[in-house]
Image (cartoon, rainbow, N blue to C red):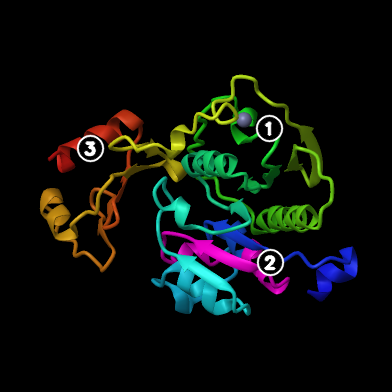
Amino acid sequence: MQGIKAVYDKEPKATIAIIGLGGTGCLVAELLARNNFSLVLVDRDEVEESNLERQILYTAQDIGKLKVDAAKSKLSNPNITTYNFNLDQTNIKDIRADLFVDCTDNMETRFLINDYCKQQSIPWIHTAAIKDQGSVMLIKPKGPCFNCFMQGKQGEVCDDAGVLNSTVTTISSLAVELIIKYLCGKDLPHGLIVYNNMATMKVNINQWSDCPTCNGDYKYLQEKKQLRLFCPAGKYHIFLNKKIDLEEARQKLKTEAQPTENYLYDEEKDITVYNYGRIIIKAPSQEQAQKTFESYFHD
Ligand SMILES: [Zn+2]
């Protein structure tokens, strides 16, 4: 590990779990792989054409492949484990890592990682990027957590404004620098690094005395309700606790669309059904999404 050794005279041997292989996840994986960290890559999606502009591990030849497979084939590092699943309270326990990096775009997963890492005393890094702004936060096993920062707000942002690929690069670099410094034993404060208007600013995070997570109430690790809704990019994602038979779904939707191996996309209704138990519905409100879901998928 020449790079790190040259700067810090240390060779941290660590396994890092990267949750989400979008723009930030690709870059974080690339930088960490080149520093010889062992990686666990977690992502549920396939590569789409719209990903190529900022998700640097994929090319046009990868469209339709699983992101975890496409990413692993590009990284020159033998120590990579992959999981093609939607991270939830049952499978997060399968991930063996010394540090987690949140490279997702949804709050549900962030709170899940926060609860799990707090319970297991694992450090993790939260990242976020939108338009030309972003933030990075180191959450250490002891001290304030992500829930302390959010103070109970669920705060899903329904925004498909996109993000500059250069902003994604900045946020990824800040995240990797935090990881390396932390694993080399640098004394880093609890805090949020905010990147805005081409400048960074540090914001102090304090412990929230009513924080459920810090008080041992890990509600995101408990059994899921039948469905949960959140909506990145103005689309509502519904997670069921069971696999979905795509042929059955096709009949329920009364669509001519043919399922692929993993999903069924009904273009007319703008509904996507994934066989591992996720349904995405475009709707103007949560109520409407719920209504649409019930009208087709009530048992
Ligand atoms: Zn907390």
Q: Is mark 3 on a helix, strand or loop?
A: helix
Kind of residue at disc 2:
Leu
- State the residue position of label 2: 32
**Amino acid type, mark 1:** Pro
* First in residue order: circle 2 vs circle 1: 2
Residue density around tag 1, few if under 14, some if 14–19, many if 20 or more, within 10 Å: many
User: Mark 3 or 2, which is nearer the eye?
Assistant: 2
Residue 216 horizontal side relative to residue 221, left or right: right
Q: In which quarter of the image is residue 161?
A: top right
- Ligand 1 resides in the quarter of the picture at top right
Q: Residue at (59%, 39%) from the top-left corner?
A: 118
Task: Inspect the magenta stretch and tell me whether residue 50 lies in it.
Answer: yes
Percent across and percent down for residue 108 are: 47, 40
Residue 178: % across, % down: 76, 52
Residue 281: which disc? none
Please state which of the two labelled residues, at mark 3 or mark 1, is closer to the viewer. Answer: 1
Q: Mark 1 points at which residue?
A: 144
Residue ID for mark 3: 292
Q: Position of residue 279 (x, y in %)?
A: 29, 48
- Residue 124 image offset from top left, x and y in percent: 64, 48
Q: Is mark 2 on a helix, strand or loop?
A: helix
Please tell me which residue lies in front, 75 or 171.
Answer: 75
Q: For the C terminus, give its image quadrant.
A: top left
Crowding at mark 3 (Cα within 10 Å: few <14, some 14-19, many 20+): some
Q: Which residue lies furthest to the top in this view?
A: 210
Q: Quadrant of residue 266?
A: bottom left
Which residues, given as a range, are shown in magenta?
27-52
Q: Taking 47 as reference, is 211 left or right?
A: right
Q: Is residue 46 left or right of residue 53?
A: left
Whether residue 145 appears in this view of the structure is yes
Q: CA gap, disc 3 to disc 1?
A: 39 Å
* Residue sitting at x 89%, y 71%: 6
